[in-house]
Image (cartoon, rainbow, N blue to C red):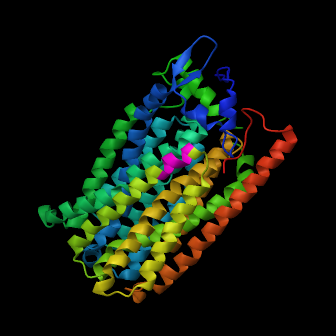
Amino acid sequence: MSAPAYQHREPSPTEDEKRPETDVAVNDVYDDQLHSDAESRINIKKLIRKVDYRLLPGLGLLYLFSYLDRTALANASIFGFQRDLGIGQTEYNLISTIFFVPYGLFEVPSQICLMYIAPHTWISVMGFAWGVTMTLSGLVQNFGGAMAARFFLGVTEAGFFPAALAICGDWYHPLNLQVRIAFFYTMGQFSGAFGGLLAYAINYMNGAGGLSSWRWLFIIEGMCTVVLAVGLYFVLPNRVDDCKWLNAEEKTAIWDRKSAGTAADPLARKFEWHYISECLKDYKVLIPTWLAMVSNIVGFGFAFQFPQILTQMGFAAERAQLLTVPVHVIGCILTFATGWFSDRIGKRYPGLLFGQGMVLIGLILVFAFPIEPRFIGPRYLGCIFISAGGKLCYPGNLTWVSNNAESNGKRHIAIAITCTMGSISTIVGTNVYLGAEAPKYTTGLSLSIALISSAIIATLVLRSLLIRANRKLDEVQGGRIEGAFRYIL
């Protein structure tokens, strides 16, 4: 099927005066109306909301359960997981780590599969598979069983997040993208708050049916994921060109907006090997990949130890679970707000610098203040800053990668490579908080401070390189051309 003929609206002089550094018409993106042909006017806000209602809730809910399933291990650790299986801190760290090996390695192959398989089918198959794996995790009896369960959980979850990012990129204008990614990402991050409450409630099931509370936690979360995955097969939309709930004019309007100011062919879906080589030589992929690695080393490393850090501050296990809730809620609010703001101003780097700065301040607070009752306040504030700042960085970084890919096929692979390296780097994060250094965790916190400082520098370097690249495009094209591709800062 060929794409509809694009008919771009001519901007008014007022709009030209308001264009941001990115050279993309932000006002066009937020206008109430947009001409899709000479005779009709489509209500763009109503059309985008129609897409939102079909796409985002399903992706958001499945991402919520994805995070619940992978982070349940941290909650299980304070409900007797290690005691029941007879394992120590080293074995626990290995069980935490093994998840991210297949999770990283299978992201690129999964993204290639998405180019050939209908999105609603691929998403549902992955969700069903990891739901079954999670349910069976509640039946493991020893270290080997736990390692196998976590390994296959990584295999089955691997493709979901990059697939969800690519699907959103197929439907939305580049400057409408981060707030949408932030929405379903926030739903996933809400698992930190919801997961703490759920674990607190399930703890009272300890002994029911002869099973420990941590086993019930795995079983209940896994079964809920299976039910949701089956439902999404019938609800989640496929691609724009074969969508049955949009008419021809609505499809044309979406194509028009999606292609405005981008170099990507929206119908180019087949995998080609040169996409990989292009990504591996492109600083616009390599620098965000480093940012993703830092985000995951710092963020996941801290998140896996967070409940234990709270108990080491003097809180009982149940109270520590409750105290994780406001930290995650604040992070979710800031993530969504930063996504909205970044789309509005048409730039990605300010939000990233804001989040990275929060993480740096938080790490310094936790590292510098002694573990004494009178310093619980500033240390807990530091935990809020680390968690919230880390959360808002990741969607902005991945949106930056998606926005600046010069072709649709390269965009799919760039997202997958960035997610792959970010996921594999989590192996470092989950092992830098050494049990022998508790409760100070000198190695974990000092390494995190160094890494987040490097991320701030890398963000500023990438901004400068993109400004230079846009100037070269201006020179080649003889000035700024309406609708021409420009890199987003």
Closest to the observer: 390 or 267? 390
Quarter in which the N terminus is drawn: top right
Residue at image point 72% right, 38% down = 263
Residue positioned most to the top: 39
Closest to the observer: 154 or 171? 171
Instruction: Give yes or no for residue 342 being in the magenta stretch.
Output: yes
- Asked whether residue 236 is in view, the answer is no
* Percent coordinates x, y for residue 418 in the rendering: 60, 57
Looking at the image, residue 258 sits to the left or right of residue 199; the answer is: right
Residue at image point 31% right, 82% down = 312
* Percent coordinates x, y for residue 283 in the rendering: 73, 58
Instruction: Locate residue 350: give its quadrant.
Output: bottom right
Residue at image point 36% right, 68% down = 146
Looking at the rendering, the stretch of residues picked out in magenta corresponds to 338-344
Q: Is residue 412 above or below residue 264?
A: below
Instruction: Give yes or no for residue 165 being in the magenta stretch.
Output: no
Residue at image point 85% right, 38% down = 477
Closest to the observer: 51 or 13? 13
Q: Is residue 236 above or below residue 438?
A: above
